[in-house]
Image (cartoon, rainbow, N blue to C red):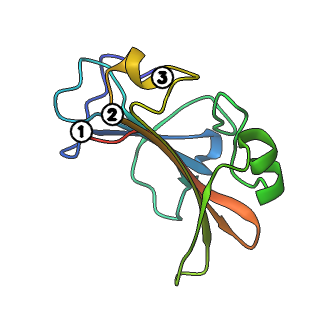
């Protein structure tokens, strides 16, 4: 998906628009990541400004578990489970935060397979609608 023509910005990020520039996908490489290795994925609604990101032929970005913008809190919990920390914000949203740390990843072995110490996922909801989510490996 990244291809050879796209280059990361100064923060090690690639940014893409969905069809009609409604959503923005940001792919982040941590310092030391290999070529085309992505450690962090972030999806949010695009703002009105156009930043000339490449557009992908995808209407809605969604995760492997079917998480997509606009979902309700209940829909999110049905897919991910109740093992989240709820964080209230002064900016008018609530955040559901999931985290896996070594050596507690005995079930999926995700961390060991990727040689990373922490995996997390953050889901921000405004008025019970998912408006931004990110997931991936915390920089060690």
Residue 42 visible in rendering: no
**Label 3: which secondary element:** helix
- Quadrant in the picture for the C terminus: top left
Do the residues under discs 2 and 1 have CB atoms within 8 angstroms? Answer: yes
Mark 1 neighbour class, 10 Å CA radius: few under 14, some 14 to 19, many 20 or more: few
What separation in Å lies between label 2 and label 3 (alpha carbons)? Answer: 10 Å
Residue depicted at 25% across the width and 30% down the height: 7
Do the residues under discs 1 and 3 have CB atoms within 8 angstroms? Answer: no
Q: Which residue is mark 2?
A: 117
* Percent position of residue 97, x then y: 55, 55
Give the quarter of the image for residue 139.
Answer: top left
Q: Which residue is mark 3?
A: 110
> Height in image: 5 above or below 124?
above
* Percent position of residue 122, x then y: 53, 53
Q: Is residue 128 left or right of residue 7?
A: right
Nearest the viewer among 117 and 79 is 117
Residue 114 visible in rendering: yes
Q: Is residue 5 left or right of residue 120?
A: left
Nearest the viewer among 26 and 114 is 114
Q: Which residue is mark 1?
A: 140
Nearest the viewer among 74 and 101 is 101
């Amino acid at each position: 998906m990244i291809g050879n023509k796209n280059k990361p910005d100064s923060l090690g990020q690639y940014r893409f628009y969905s069809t009609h520039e409604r959503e923005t996908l940001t792919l982040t490489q941590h310092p030391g990541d290999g070529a085309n290795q992505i450690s962090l994925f972030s999806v949010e609604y695009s703002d009105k400004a156009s930043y000339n990101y490449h557009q992908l032929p995808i209407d809605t970005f969604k995760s492997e578990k079917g998480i997509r913008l606009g979902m309700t809190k209940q829909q999110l919990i049905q897919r991910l489970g109740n093992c989240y920390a709820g964080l209230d914000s002064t900016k008018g949203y609530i955040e559901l935060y999931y985290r896996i740390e070594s050596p507690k990843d005995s079930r999926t072995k995700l961390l060991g397979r990727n040689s990373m110490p922490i995996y997390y996922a953050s889901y921000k909801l405004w008025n019970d609608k998912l408006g931004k989510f990110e997931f991936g490996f915390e920089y060690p």
